[in-house]
Amino acid sequence: MEWSDVRIFLAVARTGTLGAAARALQLSHPTIGRRLRALELATGQVLFQRTADGFVLTGEGTAILPLAEQMEESALTMERRLTGEQQKLEGTLKVSSADWFGAYVLPPVIGDYSRKYPLVEIEVLTGTRLFNLAQREADIAFRIVPFKGPDIVQRRLAPMRYGVYVATTSPDPAEGDGTGQRLIAMDTSTGTFPDIDWLTNRFPNASVVLQSNNRNVQAQMCGKGLGIAVLPRPVGDQLDSIRRLDLSDEPPHRDIWMGYHRDLRRLQRLRAFVDLAIKHLAD
């Protein structure tokens, strides 16, 4: 059984359709279907039940899923360790972070890095999804929560301070009240946010006018006068359309964590980026 066919089996099992598996593996839809049929012929087993809603693992497919995942982990470990031994400062480096961090915090680091190492192509992957470092979805990631897993090398870089902002032309709201005021908040469907809890407690009589999981959207809406927003200081302090309120205390800060897989710890293009990140961001 070839690893390339096992990858296709896992992609179909995880996505449920040939089209989604093709996009995940950057292969054509017919190729995925042809290789999957060949795998089933080679094993003599029907691995998926074809339904109107997509592909569902049969009992035989479910039985080999853990073995396929073990094979994937071995292949990824080999890939990471071979990559980790590369000494040349060239190739691609995938950097993952939240959208606002990539837009307002990383540019000085990336600019410095690109000037020093012009042969390295940088991919910046932003969003709320936590990219999997073990599966090489990203080489290095920045987060406001510690990393999980024993194979991740991580470092706390610095506390990220937050501030409370209103549009430049808006009057100061009454601290401790908020009557008649509106708040711009995070979408809390994915968890709780200490800064948002702090904001609602600081202005208990204010109503929430907008929720978004994107800090850039919150900042822009705040600049339009939509309401009061709590934002990371690197975002709020750089925008001319909003101003930071001078309140009796500040929202709680979050720690910025940097992490990468231990198999890549000797990869020179990664090491160079880590050193510059520490130089620019560490407290």
Image (spheres, helix red, strand yellow):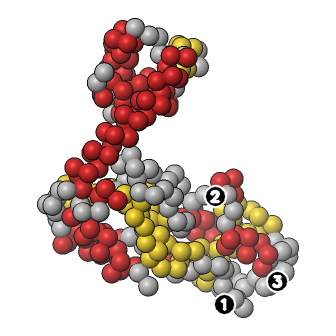
Residue lying at 19% horizontally and 56% vertically, measured from the top left: 85
Q: What residue is shown with label 1? A: 246
Amino acid type at circle 3 is Gly
Q: Earlier in the sequence, mark 1 or mark 2?
A: 2
Q: Quadrant of the C terminus?
A: bottom left
Where residue 197 sits, quadrant-wise, is: bottom right
Q: Earlier in the sequence, mark 1 or mark 3?
A: 3
68 displayed left or right of 264: right
Q: What residue is shown with label 2? A: 212
Amino acid type at circle 2 is Ser
Residue count near mark 3 (Cα–Cα under 10 Å), binned few <14, some 14–19, many ≥20? some
> In what element is the residue under mark 1?
loop
Relative height, residue 139 to residue 71 (above, below): below
Q: What residue is shown with label 3? A: 176
Q: Quadrant of the N terminus?
A: top left
- Toward the viewer: 269 or 189? 269
Q: Earlier in the sequence, mark 2 or mark 3?
A: 3
Residue count near mark 1 (Cα–Cα under 10 Å), binned few <14, some 14–19, many ≥20? few
Relative height, residue 203 to residue 98 (above, below): below
167 displayed left or right of 142: right
> In what element is the residue under mark 2?
strand
For the residues bearing labels 1 and 2, Cβ distance under 8 angstroms: no
Amino acid type at circle 1 is Asp
Q: Is residue 243 visible?
A: yes
Relative height, residue 96 to residue 137 (above, below): below
Q: CA distance from mark 1 to mark 3?
A: 13 Å
